[in-house]
Amino acid sequence: MKKLIILDRDGVINYESTEYIKTPAEWQAIPGSLQAITRLNQSGYQVVIVTNQSGVGRGYYDLDTLSRIHKKLKNALAEVGGHVDDIFFCPHRPDENCICRKPKPYFFYEIKKKYQVNLADIFFIGDSLTDVEVARLVGCQPILVLTGKGQKTLNDNPQLKEIVIFPDLSQAVDHILRST
């Protein structure tokens, strides 16, 4: 069985910003997150990111800038011996009603097809209600981290206490690696 894990980006791997991450300089890793991805890689996991990036559709940054932000992420990961296998991103604004914006399942079905995995075997780690919703919709195992929007998500949605919750990506990864 292939081992794959799906991560949200903003608020999980890097600090969230209500002003959007608009430049590579604004992208800053949450302490321990890059090392957590490296531990997943070393344990045989493929790591895929699925992220809503409506800042593109809103005109705050363009696709070239988003590419440079992702290059910074990949370079920072490489410095600690890690990598991501893929980054799927939705550039659309919420009001565009596209097929790819979480909590719509489009990218998850693309991942299922591309990587030949059973989504029921996959963890999806995120910090928002839409992350939990899409994980449930496609049958992934949702994990909520309290970084980024996670604590507010939990405060606003107390029913989420029933899912697996960790303070950050590093502790979520520790749990996954202990339990698999």
Image (cartoon, rainbow, N blue to C red):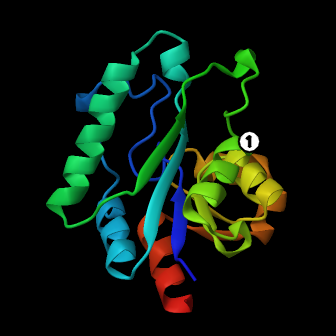
Residue shown at the point (52%, 36%) measured from the top left: 89
In the picture, measured across the screen, residue 178 lies left or right of residue 33, that is right
Which amino acid type corresponds to the residue marked 1 in the rendered image? Pro
The mark tally for this picture is: 1
In the picture, measured across the screen, residue 12 lies left or right of residue 75, that is right
- The reply to whether residue 126 is visible in this rendering is yes
Q: Which quadrant is the C terminus positioned in? A: bottom right
Depth check: 41 or 39 in front?
41
Residue that extends furthest to the left in the rendered view of this protein: 79
Residue 21 against residue 145 in the figure, above or below: above
- The reply to whether residue 26 is visible in this rendering is no
Residue shown at the point (36%, 66%) measured from the top left: 37
Please tell me how crowded label 1 is: few (under 14), some (14-19), or many (20+) other residues with Cα within 10 Å: many
Q: Position of residue 101 (x, y in %)?
A: 67, 33
Image quadrant in which you'd find residue 145 = bottom right
Q: Position of residue 113 (x, y in %)?
A: 64, 57
Q: Position of residue 143 (x, y in %)?
A: 64, 65
Q: Position of residue 59 (x, y in %)?
A: 47, 9
Q: Which quadrant is the N terminus positioned in? A: bottom right
Residue 65 against residue 79 in the figure, above or below: above
Residue shown at the point (25%, 57%) measured from the top left: 77
In the picture, measured across the screen, residue 96 lies left or right of residue 24, that is right
Judging from the image, what secondary structure is the residue with disc 1 in?
loop
Q: Which residue is mark 1?
A: 103
In the picture, measured across the screen, residue 102 lies left or right of residue 149, that is right
